Image (spheres, helix red, strand yellow):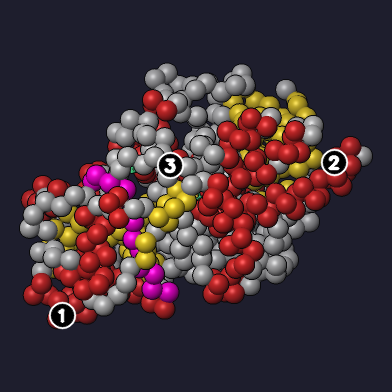
Amino acid sequence: MTLTRDVVIIGSGAAGGTVAQALAPLVRAGLRVTLFEQGAQLDDAEFTGRELEMANALFEDGGGVLTADGAMTLAFGRAYGGSTVTYTGTSLVPDAHVFERWAIPTLTHADVTARAARYATENGVHFLRDDEINENNARFADGCRAVGLEAGRFPVNTRGCRGSGLCNLGCPNAAKQGTHRVQLPAAETAGVEVVTRAEVLRVGEREVTVRVSARPPGAKGRESTWAPGEYVVRAAAVVSCGGSMGSTALLLRSGLARALPQLGERYTCHPAHILVAEHAQPIVNDVGFPKSYFLDRPDEGFILETCMYFPFITAKNLTGFGADHQRFLDAFPRLQMILVMAHDRPVPGNRITIDTAGRPVVHYTFTPAVREALVRATRLSARIFFGAGAVRVHAPSADPPLLTRDDLPHLDTRVHARHFLTHRISVSSAHMMGGCGMGADARTSVTDAWGRAHGLPWLRVADSALFPDSSDVNPYLTVMALADRAAEALTADLGALRAGADA
Ligand SMILES: Cc1cc2nc3c(=O)[nH]c(=O)nc-3n(C[C@H](O)[C@H](O)[C@H](O)COP(=O)(O)OP(=O)(O)OC[C@H]3O[C@@H](n4cnc5c(N)ncnc54)[C@H](O)[C@@H]3O)c2cc1C
Ligand code: SF4
């Protein structure tokens, strides 16, 4: 079946929701905009907070997509709202030095900050009250003070948070303000059509091929509003918001690598792993908002964040087997956690390709700089844990991986890059960036500074794939700001694009 629209948006996450809402005034004026999302839209009652059930319902491959060499797990969303359904909602804008490093004309810190501030207001970003900070988080701030550092407080985007600690499984209390709560409903009210269970298979010159699927028996989520089947939808403009992995894979399998030779390059992802420390007494850890503090160390190449993960993820992140492994899980009510995250840089070889089925494949090597950064982050975390009163620290880049206070004077040798053994350490990423990087021309980038694909005026990219380098901090507000810029440029160009489509 062939249909016609003015604009097609692919993906409904941080970027897709932003673009859909930004185009809403034009829709009220008669423009036909349809957004296709391959994931499902869940009803509030379907967010149960059960770990495996929700991971399978909301993440691509249950959150366990592996890099080509199997050394890192990549988690990204596949749902109405994309990864914003499962993000924690920590809301930062990178420092000015990040945009200086990116060196994209017109993309300034001031511009991103101003746009991000609008979405921060719209999505309820605020600081938690002191009485909403649980012990797992408070101890991080105490530990930082004990080593002479001051942790930063995360602004977060919740309304009516009940502290269930289940943010990464989709908030069961409708408190977290992702695009599924804010931008998408607003866009739909204005008349933007959102079609779920609709995977865009290919994009061609001013058209997309979409496959709509029926809800599998027993699966969560509503049926699609379109009948199952394959559709060709012609449009004056196609805006790819499938995320770093989704957009890049889509454009690659659509045969656009010849026109856009940089497709797949400049991939970064903030490689991260969880550190766990044991206290002598139970602490409040899995009740309360999970992520309230961070410590950014740009000169040392890492950021530390408080976190509290669920039993399955915690188990996966601990090294060791049998009794040693079990001991830490038995201590769950006494555990404190820190996420250590490296500021990685794009390097040749770290990139997204596709397999024979057109699915994304990430090739990623931990550079010496990333290994060193994660090791430095682990040493500092150990000091913070002990400063907070912990008795034992599980540090995967120590050998053996358990540290006690007696190890404090010897951290530089106990925790060392030579112990950072690929495949032995459980590394994961939830911040996929790049693959369709912005820049000046097609030899070095995929789009211009406003998401226009070089040489293909009808094709726009508006999502995390645009990042030419990592953001160093949690990226969703930057994604929304870039999507806002892309929507602004599209709005300005639409008259010409529609005239071109009619010609
Ligand atoms: C567990 C987790 C925690 C996070 N926590 C934070 C945080 O606290 N703070 C922060 O700043 N960032 C956080 N992030 C990162 C943040 O969520 C992402 O950077 C952001 O959502 C990326 O936006 P996006 O629009 O590029 O992609 P996404 O939000 O991932 O949306 C892409 C959407 O496109 C759909 N799609 C892809 N391909 C197709 C196709 N071919 N056809 C149809 N649909 C398609 C996908 O199903 C998906 O729904 C977190 C991410 C995860 C996974
Ligand atoms: S901690 Fe707050 S935002 Fe997170 S899942 Fe619970 S109620 Fe939702």
Disc marking residue 410: 1
Q: Label 2: state its secondary structure.
A: helix
Question: What span is colored magenta in the figure?
Answer: 286-298
Q: Nearer the viewer, residue 398 or 116?
A: 116
Residue 416, position in %: x, y? 25, 75
- Tell me the amino acid under the disc marked 2: Arg
Q: Can residue 253 be seen?
A: no
SS at mark 3? loop
Mark closest to the chain's N terminus, 2 or 1:
1
Are the residues tagged 3 and 2 within 8 Å (C-beta)? no
Q: Residue 348: image x %, image y %?
A: 53, 68
- The residue under label 2 is 498
Q: Residue at x 47, y 66 (%)?
A: 472
Residue 401, percent across and down?
Answer: 16, 65
- Give the residue at mark 3: 159
Among all residues in the image, which is located at the extreme right? 503
Is 287 contained in the magenta span?
A: yes
